[in-house]
Amino acid sequence: MNHYDIKESSLAEEGKSRIDWTAREMPVLRLIKERFGRQKPLAGVRISACLHITAETANLALALREGGAEVVLCGSNPLSTQDDAAAALVDYGIPVNAIRGEDHETYYRHIVTALEHRPQITMDDGADLVSTLHREYAGLAANVIGGTEETTTGVIRLRNMARAGKLTYPIIAVNDARTKHFFDNRYGTGQSTIDGITRATNILWAGRKVVVCGYGWCGKGIARRAQGLGAHVIVTEVQPILALEAAMDGYQVMPLIKACEIGEVFITATGDTNVIDKAHILEMRDGAIVANSGHFNIEINIPALESLARSKKRVRPFVDEYTLGDGRRIYLLGEGRLINLAAAEGHPASVMDMSFANQALCLEYLTRMKGELEPAVHPVPEEIDQEVGRLKLASMNITIDSLTEDQRKYLSTWEEGT
């Protein structure tokens, strides 16, 4: 399959430079790529991947091809594609169907193009590829060995599919690997979200009242980074234990409707819909900045914001000013899409190194386990998680202790006590 649809082929050289720069920060994936080149564990396997088309993703795609796979890519978010990285991949011979800023129709046309590759393995970031396959191209599922899912939102959707009896092949929840969500979601999302908002607005964080909606791993990372820059952080939650954790981590915790009265910057990171709703917008102060770091642009009720506004204008790249009927101004960033990819470059490569190492090793595992896994959402095998952690430590020149034989024996028995 040679079909591709990108913005401009002339961006390829710029994209190659970006990919090469990123590769310097991805030593674990490089080691896997080298082994894949020798062993070809994915020889002849057709892979359709719906991922953020970035320089980091490009390095993953090149590693998979080195392993013998036939890879086709489409974008998993209309505003996350780096057009130069897409052009570089096409120049390297990997078909890409993704254009930054593409409309809804084009987005799904590109997903269909990826499915026309008749994948044996799917890779998803948000489950749009898998859900489209199951809804509209169910006949393709018989040939699918399995798939992987990169993000929290996608894992939630896939588990709902499995509970409803609709999931027809096994999918590994890469997001749930400890070497993924402890680092990618917390440190990656934390830094890149603050980076995206800063690039879009150039605000000073020190002294700013920042409201973080959701205290999962992404919310934890965002809150920590905002606090580190001097912001006064308020956390809103619906889960009691997470709210308690936020309080004991030193943040103010309160209902969002109350936080709207004092907040200056609002960041959603929940994976749910209408987290910031009409009632919240009505309580916000003049000049409130609203951004989303969840996968889909559903966390902020944009139609409600539109209905309340008497005017709208673009005041900076990625910043839309909505003037409400009473004159208050609300600033929506990145059209409500993933702000870290809409206005910045996404996660640092060194943290994506672990996430994509998990992806590569899980694809190898799926190929080896063909026909042995039931249609369900599966965890990343513990040995893969541990191997990624070991390789990452080695790349950082960090060594750790090992258990002695006596310690191993003690941990495997029950007789010894005080």
Image (cartoon, rainbow, N blue to C red):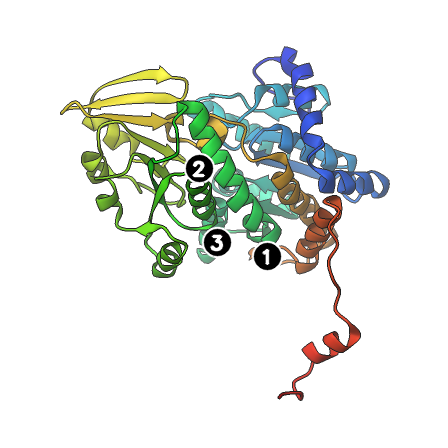
Residue 287 vs 240, above or below: the answer is above
Q: Quadrant of residue 329?
A: top left
**SS under mark 2:** loop
Q: Residue 406, percent across and down?
A: 76, 78
Residue marked by disc 2 = 229
Residue marked by disc 1 = 379
Considering depth in this image, is 174 or 146 the residue closer to the camera? 174
**SS under mark 3:** helix
Q: Residue 12, percent across and down?
A: 67, 16
Q: Can you see residue 78? A: no
Any mark on residue 144, and which?
A: none
Residue lying at 67% horizontally and 49% vertically, measured from the top left: 362
Considering depth in this image, is 250 or 144 the residue closer to the camera? 250
Residue marked by disc 3 = 159
Amino acid type of the residue tagged 1 in the rendering: Pro
Q: Is residue 246 left or right of residue 65?
A: left
Residue lying at 82% horizontally and 43% vertically, measured from the top left: 35
Find the distance from the CA under tag 2 to the CA under tag 3: 37 Å
Q: Residue 43, percent across and down?
A: 79, 40
Point out the frontmost of discs 2 and 1. 2
Q: Earlier in the sequence, mark 3 or mark 1?
A: 3
Amino acid type of the residue tagged 2 in the rendering: Leu
Q: Quadrant of residue 272?
A: top left
Q: Is residue 195 left or right of residue 365?
A: left
Find the distance from the CA under tag 2 to the CA under tag 1: 35 Å
| Quarter of the figure with the C terminus | bottom right
Q: Earlier in the sequence, mark 2 or mark 1?
A: 2
